[in-house]
Image: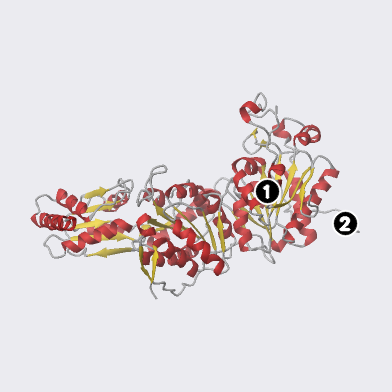
Amino acid sequence: MQAIYEMPKTLIDTATHFCPGCGHGIVLRLIAEIIDAWDIRGKTIGLAPVGCSVLAYNYLDIDMCEAAHGRPPAVATGIKRVHPDHLVFAYQGDGDLAAIGIAEIIHAANRGENITFIFVNNAIYGMTNGQMAPTSLIKQKTVTTPTGRNPANHGYPIRVCELLAVLEGSSYIERVCLSSPENIRKTKKALEKGFKTQIEKRGFSLIEILSPCPIYWRMDANESMKYIDEEMSSTFPLGVVKDWEHKN
Amino acid sequence: MKQLLTGNEAAAEAAILAGCRYYYGYPITPQNELINYISVRMPQVGGTFIQAESEIAAINMVYGSAAAGGRTMTSSSSPGISLKQEGISYLAGSELPCVIINIQRGGPGLGDISASQADYFQAVKGGGHGDYHTIVLAPCSVQEMADLVYDAFDLADEYRIPVLILGDAQIGQLMEPVEFHKKTKKVLPNKDWALTGAEGRKKRVIKSFYPIKGQLEEFNAHLQKKYKKIEEHEVRYETVNIQKADIVLVAYGTSARICKEVVKRSQQLKFRVGLIRPITLWPFPKKIIRKISERVRCILTIEMSAGQMVEDVRLAVEGRCPVHFYGRTGGGVPTSLEVIRKIVEIVPDDQAASKLLQLAEVKEYASNI
């Protein structure tokens, strides 16, 4: 009998702390699938940030490093300089990457660090009970914007991909989402392209993944997927933003 | 061969000779000679130099290289060291070896750029959040800066701990002849925890997060056990003329250099001044201070601060003798004359001590003519 679908070896078979309907599990699985398929477990080092994804090191069977809130790009830089031929990736949420760590990601991109950044954007601070994120949508209700995000008070959602694409140091930037099996396949392709960019020493790559947080969006899973397609994607347009293979 | 270098440059060269190949820093006066020098030397030895976007980024790059098993260092001065404190707490919490150099300047706030010792509390009591220590080494000359930087890397690796070199603007910018003794390296433990890719072995995780109740307390107990071992084995200090001293000065770094002058001047007199110069500020040389406090008339602590190390001196003395303090702040440096005046203020009836002051005042007068 032939197995047609199984748990990736690199994904540890354990219960996770993620809430029902959360997107993190999907992304971690995709990463594990690629590591298995490319047989690069022994040459991969991952970084977990502060936030919902901090425990990623409990779920991925690879060498992993925790980083202080917002600092994965700096920590990853330090690791990559010691192991320039290893695959180094940082897994970051929106608060981590686009608020407290915006300086570190901009400068990592600007230096053209040959590292892959996986930016899981769910437009909310999940770990701390659902506060506004730098990527929260205009009018989005969170516990710290109870009447909805108002740009006059709270500014605008930050489009990280577009921001980093203008820097000469960035090589590959794409925004994808998890709203359907088709989009999940596209996400996997984008991750593969990001890793390929690094393995071929093409420089900085970042994949932004629009991901559901049904609990703090106060929606069910289906509504969350619809919200990604209908609301999030209009603020954060999907697609390749910058690609070293197809320079404009 | 002796070279004439600033303390900052000597620190950079010693780091290179100690095998440091990953340096991350950010410009700040008065440590700029260090970052400038090492930016030239690192590429010559195939190492990494990054001028980071911030002190915060620099210390986190250090964290990454330390986690990956590299010998790594950063340097800064007081305001920049404040910015690094979060990172230092994480380094301590993840038990990562590295060297951090603080060329202290006056504070609080932006302060000024002249020499100060006002970061003592921050350096020896942890500095960031949580129950932790870093080893703190305090050089008092350019030569000692070189020697201690070299040792700092070995200590860091031996105990898996960040080691802080606490200098000041004087030590950093002063030029003195220096020789680099490449000492035999101690046998150091294998870095069997470093992130190298889990090829053919179980995965490794570098972290300081212990969310399951009880685990963090257990980890803290482990840290405290390590700190106790360091306190037992790594205390360093220098003593000058303490055997027959009437009064013993306690001072480190630049202040200790000034105190040595006072000790020298008292040698021919009946009133003898001795000096205990802590080289490790943490672990603090408690035992020798306690021992001497049982015999001397009093102890006088001299600092370029409003009185920080003096608290540790008092804790060591535990009331066995009076502990006095004289300090200057905000870039002020005590002179030997000021120290002698303070001694006479403490023992006004001692004629030999007053003689010391008379001689010092004559010398001061003569040098001003």
Q: Position of residue B26 (x, y in %)?
A: 51, 53
- Whole-angstrom CA distance, mark 2 to mark 1, is 45 Å
Q: Say if labels 2 and 1 share a chain.
A: yes
- Marked residue chain, label 2: A
Which residue position is annotated with label 2? A3
Q: Can residue B99 be seen in this view?
A: no
Residue flagged by tag 2: what amino acid is it? Ala
Tell me how many marks there are: 2
Q: Residue furthest front?
A: B369
Report helix, strand or loop for mark 1.
Answer: loop
Which residue position is annotated with label 1? A167
Q: Which residue lies furthest to the top in this view?
A: A147
Quick check: marks 2 and 1 in contact, CB under 8 Å?
no
Q: Where is residue A82 in the image (x, y as percent from the top left)?
A: 61, 63
Residue flagged by tag 1: what amino acid is it? Leu
Q: Residues within 10 Å of mark 1 (few under 14, many from 20)?
A: some
Q: Position of residue B321 (x, y in %)?
A: 20, 52
Asked whether A147 or B21 is in front, the reply is B21
Residue at (44%, 59%) from the top-left corner? B33
